[in-house]
Image (cartoon, rainbow, N blue to C red):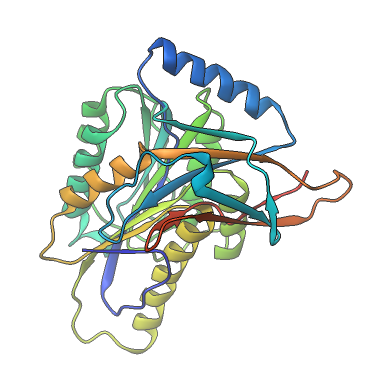
Amino acid sequence: MSIMQHGTRSAASALWVVVVLSIAGMPTVKAQAVRQSENRYRADTSLVLIPVTVTDPHSANINGLDRDSFAILDNGRPQPISVFYTEDAPCSVGIVLDVSGSMKKMLDLGKSAIRTFLQASNPEDEFFLVTVSSNPGAITEPVSDVSEIDTRARAAVAGGGTALYDAIYLALHHVRSREKKRRALLVISDGMDNLSRYSKGELMNIAVESDTQVYTMAIAGTRSGVKGAEMAEIQRGLQFMQEVATRTGGMSIRLRDYEDPATAATRLAGALRNQYVIGYRSPDDGQSEKWHRIQVKVKLSKANVYARSGYQAQ
């Protein structure tokens, strides 16, 4: 199993599980206090809040760090950290399941990954499902009963074209309307699109500006004789999924035929439930709507840091 922060090129077909997740914990007094603080922080429009995941070279989560372990740069300039806490907060999770014809041979692996991910998620999370082939399907009502989402996912049958970008856009829009302060999106696909109205660039901009993290899992199956235009299409799908994960602060997990999707799904859910939230005051004077590039650094050697790449000043 490989976990990537930067794009990896492959001629293998890939089932991408894209996760844009928001996280929250059990309803203890401490958890409630954290949520009240988070609500107060999010009401302060001058604060930039960044969920951060840190892993070691073996992809295990690194917990127990304090604010002195981190450094924040905004457009290359160091910023004082004014907010720092850790949390496993409840979230709204939208699952986009690609059931187009190209997914037929890999759909069962995706369903298995979904089941494990649901079981490993915060019990207070809520989920909804969107299937996509030639058009995005209807969005199911958000529920906390993971068995209901699992049943609906297992009933999906592959066929038709792929309007993946449109379905992701629809799910992003819906998840942002939910009451929970933190949100997630899980997209399962081979990464390719041939019927969407939205372009890759348009969707990328929407995803980056949505303040959501995108996590991708590629369940790859070998495809013999791939060349030319088909190989280029596969590469474009891989590139999009890797880029959207990197720019939004997610991680990219890729599997091969012989690897267990349940192991990867458990690891992914664990990463999403063990995050640091770091905040600083934007140096923008509020007179411009320019893009700010964010860099999060950790004072550990050989650590992987996952954080969004920037924000648009308002």
Residue 74, by quadrant, is bottom right
Whether residue 214 is situated above or below residue 202 in the rendered picture? above
**What residue is shown at x 20% (from left), y 77% (from top)?**
223
**What residue is shown at x 36% (from left), y 78% (from top)?**
9
Q: Residue furthest right?
A: 287
Q: Residue furthest left?
A: 258
Whether residue 145 is situated above or below residue 284 in the rendered picture? above
Q: Residue furthest bottom?
A: 228
Residue 157 appears anywhere in the view:
no
Where does residue 56 sit, x and y in percent of width and height?
32, 56
- Report how many numbered discs are placed on residues in the image: 0
Quarter holding the C terminus is top right
Whether residue 186 is situated above or below residue 107 in the rendered picture? above
Of residue 283 and residue 224, the one placed in the foreground of this image is 283
Residue 193, by quadrant, is bottom left
Whether residue 105 is situated above or below residue 286 in the rendered picture? below
**What residue is shown at x 75% (from left), y 36% (from top)?**
46
Where does residue 145 sit, x and y in percent of width and height?
27, 22
Q: Would you say 226 lies left or right of 81 here?
A: left
Of residue 99 and residue 17, the one placed in the foreground of this image is 17
Residue 148 appears anywhere in the view:
yes
Of residue 251 and residue 233, the one placed in the foreground of this image is 251
Where does residue 138 sit, x and y in percent of width and height?
42, 37
Quarter holding the N terminus is bottom left
Q: Would you say 82 lies left or right of 121 here?
A: right
